[in-house]
Image (cartoon, rainbow, N blue to C red):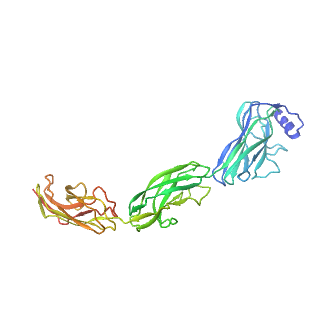
Amino acid sequence: MMKVRSIFLLILTGLLILVTTASAVTLSAGNVQVATPGTTATVNIVLDQVPAGLAGYNLSIGLSNTSVAEIVSVSFPGWANRNIAGWPHQNANSTIPSDSVWIKAADLNNLIVPGAKKVTLATITIRGDTVGTTPVTLAVRQISDDAGTNIVPTRVNGSVAVRLPDLVIASVDGPVTAGQGERIPVVNTISNLGTYATDKPFLVQFFLSVDGTQNNFVIGKRKITALAAGASDTATTSLAVPPKITPGTWYVKGIVDPNRQIAEARENNNARFDPVATTITPRPDLVFSWIDGPGTGTIGQRISITLNVTNSGASPVTGLSYVQMYLSPDTVITGSDKLLKKFMVPPLGADQSITIGGSPVVQASITPGSYYLGGILDYGNLVAEQDEKNNKGFDPVPIQVVA
């Protein structure tokens, strides 16, 4: 009963003159971050060591910046006895939530042995109210060891930071011109202006907008895994212009975290558009108007073939392209069929056509039989077209190849 008696003498009556020990004991509160206002974090109040054991303590804990956070609850470890008459665990004049709390407890069952390390006295739950930082201050009214000697620890105050990221698109830079259906490179920089790192991955979504405010066409997105406070992430993102978009003036626009996966300090600054408009131009479209070959062909001999190529798009083909002609056992023309001839196709204006002809040799590797004369336009994909799937054609009348 020595410990109980010492506590009552020290705390309840206050009549005993205490002996102060100068020990290298540290009392500390942890540093924590509250992810968002309205959520909580816990701070442990810890003595790093108790060389002569622990009889009890009487502490005050406060938050200096009362607008940032408040104490919403206090919990105690299992050894802490608070059921002593006249010794409540918190000040009867204080209420929770509060910006300060007075806590007291005793180790009546001698569970904290002399020499114990990292003794948790209490755990304070703190709720964030607004973005900011507040110190967690410690005021020691009394801490006693098992012999009734007063412990005067070095106090290390803690802190609570209520922090949020703040994601913005610092810049978005699209091309001056682009064609329908074309892939375009867009250089974009995403910055976190907040005081807290993002806690999960988030997306950046891109649009073509008629005026910079509307989100008319989704053209792609990119994912950012994490972004530290004050950091930026720059990337060149390949985006797809819709093939059926109306040619004209459009603005490349980005929205960071469009689905609001990240809680932010500000949610109204996540969009930005390139102030320099992108002019969307119509694209050319190469198609076969017709293909014509002979009714028969002899292996090792030349055959005469002609084909007509039309640019059915609303934009000119400004460079050279190529067409490869094949003999195919069916009407599904592929690059695996028997190659006859490769022709060059010159630049073509919108709605312009050209007839090309030649006399290729029927190669000896071809087996006698029935074949379709077919072709693949823009072989090698040198021309960005309105429709990349209509470049094949064939003569519906097959050629009978004989030895």
Left or right, 123 with respect to 393, comes to right
| Along the viewing direction, whichever of 284 and 163 lies nearer the viewer | 284
* Residue 134, image x, y percentages: 71, 48
* Residue 382, image x, y percentages: 31, 57
Residue situated furthest left in the rendering: 403
| Along the viewing direction, whichever of 335 and 242 lies nearer the viewer | 242
* Among the 4 quarters of the image, the one containing residue 150: top right
* Residue 82, image x, y percentages: 79, 43
Tag count: 0
Residue 259 shows in this picture? no
Residue 243 shows in this picture? yes
* Among the 4 quarters of the image, the one containing residue 385: bottom left
As drawn, 80 above or below 235: above
Residue situated furthest right in the rendering: 15
Q: Quadrant of the N terminus?
A: top right
* Residue 228, image x, y percentages: 57, 48
| Along the viewing direction, whichever of 257 and 29 lies nearer the viewer | 257
As drawn, 367 above or below 50: below
Q: Quadrant of the C terminus?
A: bottom left
Residue at 88% over, 38% down: 14
Residue at 69% over, 51% down: 127
Left or right, 84 with respect to 275, comes to right
* Among the 4 quarters of the image, the one containing residue 306: bottom left
Left or right, 257 with respect to 313, comes to right
Residue at 67% over, 48% down: 161
